[in-house]
Amino acid sequence: MHKKLSLLLVVAMLLSVVLSACAKPTPQVVTKVVTKEVQKVVTKEVKVTTVVEKVVTKEVQKVVTPTPVPLKKGAKVTITWWANEKGRDTAATREMHFKLARMFEKEHPNIKVALSLFPSHGFGTRVATAIAAGQGPDVWYHYYSPEIATHGFLENLTPYMKRDGIDPAKLWFPIGQVRAQYKGNYYGVPRDVTAAFIVYNKDIFDAAGVAYPKPGWTFADYRQKAIALTNAAKGTYGAGAIVGGAGGLEWSPFSFNLGADYVSPDGHKVVGYMDTPATINAFKMFMDLTRKDKVTAPSGMSEQFGELVFLSGKVAMQSVSTWEIPALQAKAKFHWGVVEPPRFNKDTKEIPWTDAYVYYMWSGSKHKDAAWELLKFLSGPEAAKVIGESKVWTPNSPQVWKDLGLDKDPVWSVAWNELQKPNARVANYLRSQYQWDCIQPVFDDSWTYYVVQKKDDLAGFMKKSVQKAQACLDNNYNQ
């Protein structure tokens, strides 16, 4: 949910374009020094990102695809599972990966899992490079746009699911199903689920004499509280991180709850979505938190605290997801609470911002049957219980939430309630594989025009920008 996601997603959405730009990587089984060794490689990969963006998508046809080897009864095979670690992750994250791998191997003595953990920064490049060289991982997780399935490097898992009687509706939350599907077929299985909500600093609220936010509040309530809680002299701010900036319009609950949707459900259209009066008004309202109300924390705070600027103790409210809660619980030195995101106004219902990481199988895997067994385990109830107990991620299974009491927990229940709300939808920035080439500039350029340059014809500016974005999308989809 941070703007730094953009670099990773550029690479991920354009996986097919790194065929001639990157060097062939060497997969590794994790050891205590793997992170240090891989970090050096990642630095080199990031340098070729500008090349990646310019190569045409159709070159995916050059990917080397090894011949699959059927899993024979009694045969022993080794499959590769690539995972990644973010800066916010704790030692518990790494241990959970190993625990899951060991559990699977115990239940499948003929299948060895070569687990490799890499830094999240540049992970998409690493996977893309390996696939282009014909040496991709058998299994990995990421957060591609569902339509990335059109490139052909993801195995269609629907036949495996039907063969083994897997019923997604009985296993996973709706958002996990939505994120793993493309046109009725499953090209992945959900690793976890997450939901976004607002975390607030009770100490700042108490000092300012401002009432805590309650369910059912509106954006107007949010803005009013942010203004009342901002005290420049004391260095405290009503809101922080991506709130008030372009990113908050893309990967936060505000992207769904300001009275407009910015991209068509299939990701192919922005005309009729981003150029409407409702959308332009939403952009203006949100960016005014920074331009006029001046309630948002300075960017320098993110440089010090990363995406979780709330940990500074100087930010009264921040939009977070369950992915940030473990770090918050471990490091916060103040009293805090959680509440559902604000809705647009009193006449509208709050739309949940939910998401899921997805496990994929490489279509070029030599050991597809074994890889499927791992995927089935990692997305099943046994693994979901381990994940739920660790609280590193939140489980993909509603039943596991109930079994572990997460649905009643003071913090996690807020996410649970969000996950129960109808109309699970793919986040608008994950709908099109050309988001970062075509659509993203509208967000960034509008921010520069309205907030930085303080120009006022936002409607005229956005309409022209949206026309360019649509032309870009049409050009890419018509190739």
Image (cartoon, grey):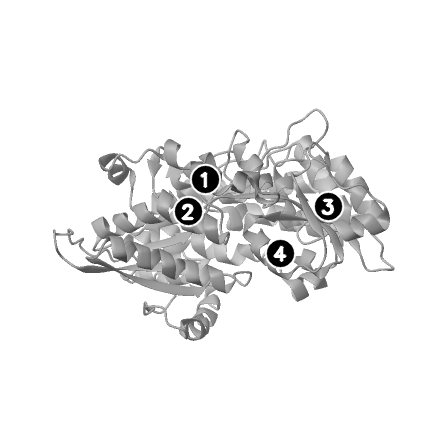
For the image, the number of numbered tags is 4
**Looking at the image, can residue 427 be seen?**
no
Q: Indicate the quadrant where residue 457 lies.
A: top right
Amino acid type for the residue under numbered disc 4 = Leu
Q: Residues within 10 Å of mark 1 (few under 14, many from 20)?
A: few
Classify mark 4: helix, strand or loop: helix
Residue 259 position (above or below residue 311): above
- Circles 4 and 1, Cβ within 8 Å, touching? The answer is no
- Circles 3 and 1, Cβ within 8 Å, touching? The answer is no
Residue 307 % position (x, y): 62, 57
Which residue is more in the foreground, 226 or 75? 75
Q: CA distance from mark 4 to mark 2?
A: 22 Å
First along the sequence among labels 4 and 1: 4
Residue 229 % position (x, y): 82, 49
* Residue bearing mark 3: 287
- Circles 1 and 2, Cβ within 8 Å, touching? The answer is yes
Amino acid type for the residue under numbered disc 2 = Lys
Q: CA distance from mark 1 to mark 2?
A: 9 Å
* Residue bearing mark 1: 403
Amino acid type for the residue under numbered disc 3 = Met
First along the sequence among labels 2 and 3: 3
